């Protein structure tokens, strides 16, 4: 998969492409269905398949601290997209200029000029351009007027009679329904990141942790979880706290994972942490001894959970 970041780095296929665009937050089963259709149409036309998304996500740009919780970071989107067989993945910076661009200019200046669009596939709720004026009907009209591309509206993907969406996944995670989120994603919910240096407090307490920056304005989960961690060359079970660590007056949200039976230097490595089951909410303890005792109980709870899964 070719990854292109920024308008100046877009290298169009002379044959053109089949493209879809949107936020793709979570890359859930509905997104995967759209991407599968993109690949099919690209094979039929003999052109490349492409996905376009934006950083920051438009709602983050407009809402700032009031933005919805983010399911996937740029790195995670790249990781998941690379497994779906897309030829080209493009990320454009959502800037003031892009936010004010008329939808007609976006189609002609970016989709046609930069991507040489042949066929466009969009979700049923997609809007774009200044004041969200761009719509499926506008795209149909411009495709007919230019004679250069056709448009297809992807049907909703439903489970148990309900439409799968990023919003429903956020709600499921906020309500601790990890099983529901897993079904809509087609995989356990996970957080991927590079392990960074922390305060080494976990080591002092006897529970060394791998610390991962969440890189989100708003995290979709918080609390203590039983986890499975993929380190690339090995997989470990353990527990993780996602939150601000109120007992030590933390202010920045962080994922701290204690991996059972693991010893070694993890700094700088990338880890994918799958959330298996929630153990409890994050809370402030009276002192570090009380926190240490609770971590020991959390580990025991997780061990019992894993024993029941074997």
Image: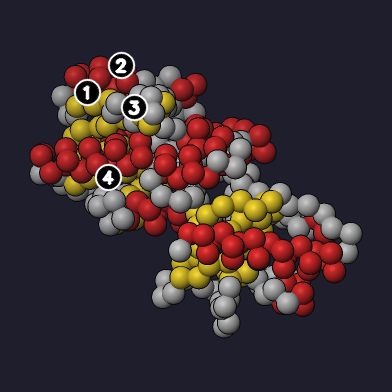
Q: CA distance from mark 2 to mark 3?
A: 18 Å
Q: Which residue is mark 2?
A: 137
Residue 39 appears in which quarter of the rendering? top left
Q: CA distance from mark 2 to mark 4?
A: 22 Å
- Residue 118's spot in the image, x, y percent? 18, 34
User: Rounded to the nearest whole Å, what is the CA distance between mark 1 and mark 4?
Assistant: 18 Å
The local crowd at label 2, few if under 14, some if 14 to 19, many if 20 or more residues have their Cα within 10 Å, is few
Q: Secondary structure at mark 2?
A: helix
The tag earlier along the polypeptide, 1 or 4, is 4
Query: Depth check: 234 or 65 in front?
Result: 234
Instruction: Give the labeled residue for mark 3.
Output: 156
Q: Residue at x 54, y 54 (%)?
A: 275
How crowded pointer 3 is (Cα within 10 Å; few <14, some 14-19, many 20+) is rated as some
Q: CA distance from mark 3 to mark 4?
A: 20 Å
Name which of mark 1 and mark 2 comes first in the sequence. 2
Q: In the figure, is residue 296 to the left or right of 69?
A: right
């Amino acid at each position: 998969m070719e990854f292109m970041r920024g308008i100046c780095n877009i290298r169009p296929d002379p044959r053109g492409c089949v493209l879809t665009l949107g936020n793709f937050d979570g890359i859930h089963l509905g997104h995967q269905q759209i991407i599968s259709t993109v690949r099919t149409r690209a094979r039929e036309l003999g052109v490349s398949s492409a996905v376009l998304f934006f950083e920051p996500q438009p709602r983050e740009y407009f809402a700032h601290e009031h933005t919805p919780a983010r399911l996937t970071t740029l790195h995670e989107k790249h990781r998941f997209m690379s497994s779906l067989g897309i030829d080209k993945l493009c990320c454009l910076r959502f800037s003031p200029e892009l936010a004010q661009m008329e939808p007609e200019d976006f189609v002609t200046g970016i989709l046609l000029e930069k991507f040489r669009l042949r066929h466009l596939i969009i979700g049923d709720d997609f809007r774009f351009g200044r004041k969200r004026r761009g719509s499926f009907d506008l795209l149909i009209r411009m495709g007919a007027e230019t004679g250069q591309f056709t448009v297809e509206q992807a049907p909703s993907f439903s489970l148990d009679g309900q439409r799968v969406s990023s919003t429903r996944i956020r709600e499921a995670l906020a309500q601790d329904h990890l099983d529901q989120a897993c079904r809509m994603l087609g995989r356990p919910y996970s957080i991927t990141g590079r392990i960074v240096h922390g305060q080494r407090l976990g080591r002092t307490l006897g529970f060394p942790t791998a610390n991962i920056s969440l890189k989100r304005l708003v995290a979709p989960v918080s609390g203590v979880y039983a986890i499975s961690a993929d380190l690339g060359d090995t997989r470990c079970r353990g527990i993780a706290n996602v939150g601000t660590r109120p007992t030590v007056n933390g202010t920045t949200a962080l994922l701290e994972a204690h991996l059972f039976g693991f010893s070694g230097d993890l700094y700088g490595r990338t880890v994918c942490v799958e959330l298996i089951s929630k153990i409890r909410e994050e809370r402030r303890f009276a002192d570090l001894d009380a926190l240490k005792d609770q971590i020991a109980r959390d580990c025991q709870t997780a061990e019992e959970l894993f024993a029941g899964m074997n």
